[in-house]
Amino acid sequence: DEFDFEQKGSDADWEHLIEVESRAAVAEEDEDSWRDEIAREARKRFAPEPEPPTHRPAAAAPPTETPEERERRLTSERRQEDIRLLMNRKADDAAWDAFKALPSERRLLLNDVPWPTGPEGNILSFSSTMSSEEKTKMRRLALLRWHPDKF
């Protein structure tokens, strides 16, 4: 539990921390205990103010859904996610095409490379409806696009 002492604080705050540090040294405590005490005091003094609780009306109990309604809802959510991933793949492909159109004599910067923008855990934006052959084809294309030897 280290504390960043570079944060802003008033002179009184810093004087208090110095006092705590000197008290710990006088008491001849071991290094760990006085460091812990200073860190505890600093966290108390420099901790952000807690946000006041927001008073929200109590949520009504969710209505129970039938298995058919649940399946329709999940199918709709999957369809929406598949559409979002498809749009993401299309945007990535368009960015790659623009990247390929850059002049070859131009010096490349890291920010010039259109890295894939899929969500964490699905960086290539595979949809749930894709076959394993389609996924393999996309992986192969990705390896060709972003292989380190290419740059």
Image: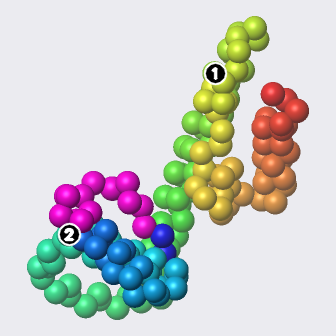
Distance in Å between CA atoms under marks 2 and 1: 47 Å
Dot 1: element: helix
Q: Where is residue 107 in the image (x, y as percent from the top left)?
A: 71, 15
Q: In this picture, which residue range is highlighted in magenta?
A: 3-15
Read off the residue under disc 1. 98
Q: Position of residue 77 (x, y in %)?
A: 48, 66
Residue at 48% of width from left, 70% of height from top? 2
Q: In which quarter of the image is the C terminus?
A: top right
Q: Is residue 7 within the magenta segment?
A: yes
Name which residue type carries label 2.
Glu
- Residue 123, can we see it? yes
Instruction: Please tell me which of labels 2 and 1 falls first in the chain.
Output: 2
Tag nearer the camera, 2 or 1: 2
Q: Residues within 10 Å of mark 2 (few under 14, many from 20)?
A: few
User: Is 113 left or right of 119, judged from the image as shown?
Assistant: right
Residue 49: image tag: 2
Residue at 66% of width from left, 58% of height from top? 122
